[in-house]
Amino acid sequence: MEMGSAEAHLPWALALFFIPLTAILWAILRRPSGRKLPPSPPSLPIIGHMHLMSQLTHRGLARLAAAHGGLFHLRLGLSRTVVVSSPAMAKQVLQLHDHAFAGRPTTASIRYLTYDLSDMAFANYGPFWRQIRKLCVVKLFSRRRAQSWDCVSSEVDSATSAIASSPPRQPVNLGEIAFNLARNVTYRAAFGSSGGRGEEQDKFIGILQEFSKLFGVFNLADFVPWLEVLDLQGIKKRLVKARSELDTFIDRIIDDHLASPKEGDDPKADMVDDMLAFLDESGAAGGDTDSAELAGSFKLTRNNIKAIIMDVMFGGTETVASAIEWAMAELLRNPSEMQKAQAELTKVVGIDRKVNEEDIDKLPYLKCIIKETLRLHPPIPVAMHEAMEDVEVAGFWVPAGTRVLVNAWAIGRMWSAWKRAEEFWPERFVEEEAAREMSGGSFELVPFGSGRRSCPGMRLGLYGLELAVAQLVHCFRWELPAGMKPEEMDMGDVFGLTAPRAVRLCAVPTPRLACPI
């Protein structure tokens, strides 16, 4: 989060707000008698827990959970937040009360950059959101949509070929390779050939990176709403500029697609082609009823298409790239696990060819490695929900409008739920914990969320992750650079929408196959 500009304005902003409105705030935030909120850390008058803002990371929230339990609450300015940090409480929120917590909290930045919640990730739960989700599941991320899945294999091959052609005995930056691989896959799936490569792609990634910063920026107006008009931190100017640049870029791509339309069954059709089948240039989006079929009353505006594309780019780039890098980092830190994975690959695939799609389901230990990576390093460490109505959870009152943070990172490392919780031990999924799966039914393992707001692109993302890691492990022997020992590796992360490694992973590859790579 960008804290510097906020801190510069904080003293007088607090004076503007807190002194004259103390009595009003106290009346708004007092809870009705007889209703018990979840436990909370000690708070301060008026500002509540805003002095704990530095703890609102996956690690900081896990430390607070250790002291206050798997369900606790924080009061941040005018907003209430409930934090979920145990499998039992995750089941309450994501399954037993799934409908009540199907909302998404938003900020001023999110509302503006998603064209007033025109996307799927942050759209209000309701008939239109259900139709957008159906579009994503049935069309955009479907296994029948060959273009998306084929470009995964193609880009993985390009990445391994680039590594093979690098100078011998020299380290390569696996973090950069993973990011470029995930970016290229997502870009091709979304735009096909119309998006261009090189400078055009770099320009779009620059827009994406600014969006990412603005999504995570600390904005005083999110906690003190009437400060938004003052724009004390200059955030509004950045929002307008970023969205204007996105409009220019994607409007051109939409116009190119409209000029050369493709049928839905065209193997070269991309995600923009699929969405343009539902375009309504009049600006009226949505369906009239819950049963509106995709081919019937369901319509999209240009703003819907732009916002969904941003969902796809965020969901398919940073998350997959981070997971690939973390998997390789854990294998390099645990050489015996790398040896087990390569032994399985040699047995199933052999050393005379590379891994193909059909091999993946024959590699059970590789799948255990992927599950263990996602347990320790979930793509979205803290998932955001919002209570759409007053609800009672485990005997505690959670009022409507409360932000609910599900700390998947803390749940995956909970000592009472996992043996050797802090260790990278893939074999756990071969033994008694084998039944725990990642699709949302096992609340000890929720890297993709669960329930109505679970990730619709999970299957495509997992396919890219599994194939990339399998190919990297199969094609090369890996060593740490400059004689570094595994225990010397920096395994720190950086908190944001994702939690990537703090230090990019570099390693020395040596080809191990008897065929050209």
Image (tube, grey):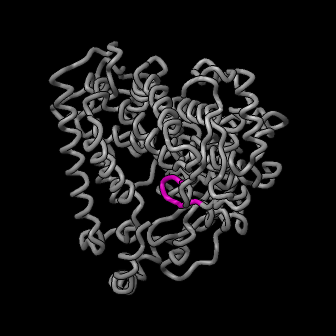
In this rendering, position of residue 126 left or right of residue 95:
left
The vertical placement of 71 against 234, above or below, is above
The vertical placement of 197 against 175, above or below, is above
Q: Main secondary structure of the magenta part?
A: loop
Residue 435 at what x, y percent from top left?
A: 77, 32
Residue 64 at what x, y percent from top left?
A: 66, 68
Q: Residue at x 47, y 48 (%)?
A: 176
Residue 118 at what x, y percent from top left?
A: 31, 42
Does residue 343 appear in this view? yes
In this rendering, position of residue 246 left or right of residue 435:
left
The picture quadrant where one finds residue 294 is top left
Q: Residue at x 25, y 42 (%)?
A: 200
Q: Quadrant of the C terminus?
A: top right
Q: Which residues are magenta?
A: 493-500
Is residue 496 covered in magenta? yes
Does residue 440 appear in this view? no
Q: Quadrant of the N terminus?
A: bottom left
Q: Residue at x 25, y 64 (%)?
A: 236
Residue 88 versus residue 60: which sits nearer the camera? 60
Residue 215 at what x, y percent from top left?
A: 39, 57
